[in-house]
Image (tube, rainbow, N blue to C red):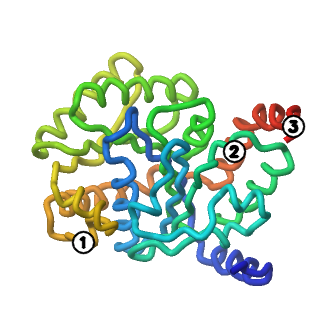
Amino acid sequence: MKIDQAENLRKQIASAKSGRKTKVVSIVSGKGGVGKTNISINLAIGLSQIGKKVLLVDLDIGMANIDIVAGVSAQATIVDMIEEKLSIYDIMADGPAGISMIAGGSGLSFLFQLNAIKFSYFLRQIEQLEHQFDYIFFDMGAGITKDSMSFILSSHEAILVLTPEPTSITDGYALVKALHAEDDRLPIYTIVNACENENEGYEAALRFKRAAHDFLGKEVAMIGALPFDRTVSRAVREQVPFLLSAPKSKVSLSMKKIIFTYSGQEIKTKKEFGNFLTKLTKLLTPMLKRGSNNGE
C-alpha cells in the first residue's frame, strides 16, 4: 500500500525535529562466503536493541538476499521503486527487532544504468531518509566493481568483513588498496569472522592492520572478532538472526561486544548526510550520461 504525500511530509518534519544525524555505512568483503550478510543483519539488530534506528539496504547485485536471511517477506524492491515511481516508504519493510529493510531485487544492476531523470527520482527518495535513521547500512556484494565503488566511496565509512583465512586477508587487502587509491580519507574498520577463538581474530586483524599501514599508509581499526559457532548456520536455516534465536551463544555475546565498541565511535566519525548525496551524485554522473546516450 502506498503512503500518501501528506504522510511522507509528516514523517520528514517529525524526523527533522528529532535532530537525528544519519551515518551511511557500507559493509564490504574481499571475497564471498565470509558471513558479511549475517553480520550486517545482526549488527543492525544489535544497534536497534540499544535504541538506535537502523535501515539495512541490500546492494549486493550478485546475491541480494538479506530479506531471506532475516526471514522478511519483501513486497517491493529498489528496482520497483524506480520503475513504478513508488515512494521509498513503499519498499521499506519492517525487519526483526525494530530494524527497517530495503530489498535490492534480482535486477539491481539496473540501478547503475539509470538515465538522468530516473537517477534524480532515486536521489529524491534517498534524501527523505535524512534524520529518519541513526544508521543506514549498505550490504554490498563481495569484492568491488566500478559501480559498487561509487556507493562505498560515498559512504561515511566502510566495515570490512574478514576471516583468518589467507585468501580472505589477501582479497580484503586488494579491496582496501582499490578504495584507498580513490579516497585515502575513507575510514575503514574490520570485523574478523569465523575465528577459532578471539585471539586468532585479533592476530588476523593485527596482520591486516600492519600490511595496510606499511604498504598503503592506511590506518585500519578493528571493531572486534566473532567465533565460529554452529548457531549461525542453524539461524540461517531457520531464518531467524542469531542475536534473536540464541542471544546467549558465543557468537551473540561476541557480537554484543562489537555493538558496544562500534556504537562508542559514532560521535568521532559522524558526518553530514548531504556529503553522502553530493559524493554519490558526482561519482555516478558519468554513468548517467552513458545511460542517456543509450536511450534508457
Left or right relative to 266: residue 38: left
Q: Residue at coordinates 40% horizontally, 55% vertically from top-left?
A: 40
Residue type highlighted by circle 2: Phe
Residue occupied by mark 1? 245
Quarter assignment of residue 240: bottom left
Question: Which of these two is toward me, 153 or 111?
Answer: 111
Residue 203: % across, % down: 16, 33
Q: Residue at coordinates 40% horizontally, 65% vertically from top-left?
A: 70
**Spatial distance from mark 3 to mark 2, Cα to Cα?**
13 Å
Residue 292 is labelled as 3
Check disc 1: other Cα within 10 Å, few if <14, some if 14-19, many if 20+: some
Residue 267: % across, % down: 45, 57
Among all residues in the image, which is located at the extreme top?
Answer: 215
Above or below residue 240? Residue 158 is above
**Spatial distance from mark 2 to mark 1, Cα to Cα?**
35 Å
Label located before the other in sequence (3 or 2): 2
Q: Secondary structure at mark 1?
A: helix
Residue 110 is labelled as 2
**Spatial distance from mark 3 to mark 1, Cα to Cα?**
47 Å
Q: Nearer the viewer, mark 2 or mark 1?
A: 2
Quarter assignment of residue 41: bottom left
Label located before the other in sequence (3 or 1): 1
Above or below residue 261? Residue 166 is above
